[in-house]
Image (spheres, rainbow, N blue to C red):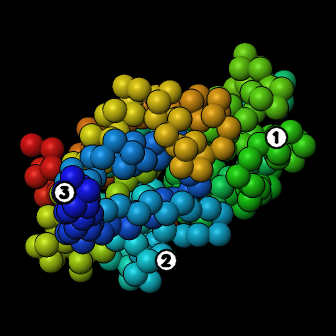
Amino acid sequence: MKKLMFTLMAGAMALAAAQSALAADKVTLQLKWVTQAQFGGYFVAKDKGYYKAEGLDVDIKPGGPDSAPEQIIAGGGADVIVDWMGGALVAREKGVPLVNIAQPFDKSGLELICPKDGPIKSEADFKGHTLGVWFYGNEYPFFAWMNKLKIPTEGGKDGVTVLKQSFDVQPLVQKQADCISVMTYNEYWQAIDAGFKAEDLLVFNYTKLGVNLLEDGLYVNEEKLKDPAFKEKMVKFVRASMKGWKYAVEHPDEAAEIVVDNGGQDEAHQKRMAGEVAKLIGDGKLDKALYERTEKALLEQKIINKEPKGAYTHAITDAALK
């Protein structure tokens, strides 16, 4: 009799679990880069069951040098992507109707670093020198900055030579560039690990210079957002994601361990990254002034040619974060 009851209970539990799995709304999140603490809040939200509590089954897909989130969502490979505003607005102008629904990063992690014993001592020294820049949508803040300084980017003694930089610090190590692009939470520390000392580096921080453009935000297809069911699903997704980010900010070491459990490399590096990323996280709501500054910089540089309409909405965060 006891064996029969146990079998019935086990069957009921299995049925309930199956029904719960079937009931969960599936969401595919496409990251902008590989699995690392830059995206810690999403992995925490999944690990801690925040998505599950909202009735969501979230699949987090890592990115890489050969993947463009804008193209992936355009092809139906994701419901929501992590992207920089510059890349998203360029894609929107080209016909991919991306809409920003939340902005977890309210500060930029982008920097340009130069050895102090090199020729660059200030912005005035950029002319005639080679600067390393990432592309694939990451170049827009740099070109907007040079436009503000009125420095041509086609080389020559009155301009700068732009080196299409690899996603590491080798151009600085091998002296291919006088300065290179880094993120506060990643490549800056790669430079330190490569033997550069903090006191020997001149750092141009985009945020401190007031030339930062919006970085990691959450974007969806505008057409899908017209569906009330999808809109409600995104409210749940953003609410759980920001709960994950809050936990990651408060427990960076644990967040890094969760990232490593999901495929992140080098736990010590991930912990250091998680601590730096925590300094960049806001409440998730897009700051209109920062959006307008990003838009203005892109228009002035002719990175986009016309003022975007409907490129962001506060409707999701207003509902998720109230």
Task: Describe residue 182's horizontal placement relative to residue 144 as left or right.
Answer: right
Indicate left or right for 272 with 316 as reference: right
x, y (%) of residue 227?
Answer: 15, 77
Where is mark 2, residue-wise? 71
In this figure, which residue is indicated by the disc labeled 3?
A: 1
What residue does disc 1 label? 172
Cα–Cα span, label 1 and label 3: 74 Å
Judged left or right of residue 182, residue 256 is left
The image quarter containing residue 40 is top left
Query: Marks 2 and 3: in contact by CB < 8 Å?
Result: no
What residue appears at the point 83 percent right and 26 percent down from the top-left corner? 195
- The percent coordinates of residue 287 (x first, y second) are 26, 45
Look at 41% across and 26% down and name the residue there: 251
Disc nearer the start of the sequence (3/2): 3
Q: In front: mark 2 or mark 1?
A: 2
Residue 239 percent coordinates (x, y): 21, 48
The residue furthest front is 1
